[in-house]
Image (tube, rainbow, N blue to C red):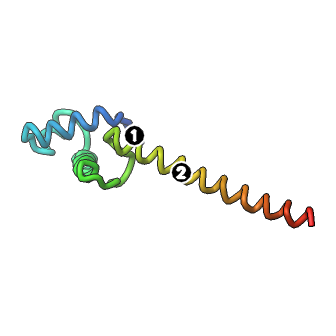
Amino acid sequence: MSQQKRLYDASYKIEVVRMILDQGLSVSQVSKNLTISESALRRWVVQYQAELQGKPGIGKPLTEEQQRIRLLESENRQLRQDNEILKKASAFFARELR
């Protein structure tokens, strides 16, 4: 029998991480109370601390700032790809007109 993976939104993860960091609760205590694995909680704490330092961290971003940065990076990557395609197309058509 497989265990179904539970998904948590970023605001919930931040709330749980703040319980650990701000209230001084232990990861194991919070894990037992909320029935979330300790490894997941530790990942969330590491992710949150990295994002507070302005680093991207690993996994889906938790803070709004990092979510916005990821979105802008994705848009920037797409625009660069589109620009390269347009450059190649214009070079192709310029050769055809000669």
Please state if 29 lies on the left or on the right of 37 as rendered.
left
Please state if 13 lies on the left or on the right of 76 as rendered.
left
Hey, what amino acid is under mark 1? Answer: Lys
Residue 57: name its quadrant. bottom left
- Describe the element under mark 1 as helix, strand or loop: loop
Which residue: 24% across, 53% down?
53
The residue under label 2 is 76
Percent across and percent down for residue 58 are 35, 54
Total marks placed: 2
Give the mark, 2 or 1, whose residue is nearer the N terminus.
1
Hey, what amino acid is under mark 2? Answer: Asn
- Which of the two discs, 2 and 1, sits closer to the camera? 2
Marks 2/1: CA distance? Answer: 32 Å
Percent across and percent down for residue 67 are 39, 42
Percent across and percent down for residue 7 are 38, 36
Residue 5 is tagged as 1
Q: Which residue is outermost to the left?
A: 24
How many residues crowd mark 1 within 10 Å: few (<14), some (14–19), many (20+)?
few
How many residues crowd mark 2 within 10 Å: few (<14), some (14–19), many (20+)?
few
Percent across and percent down for residue 21 are 13, 43
Q: Is residue 62 above or below residue 76?
A: above
Out of 58 and 88, give the one closest to the viewer: 88
Which residue: 28% across, 37% down?
13
Out of 76 and 12, give the one closest to the viewer: 76
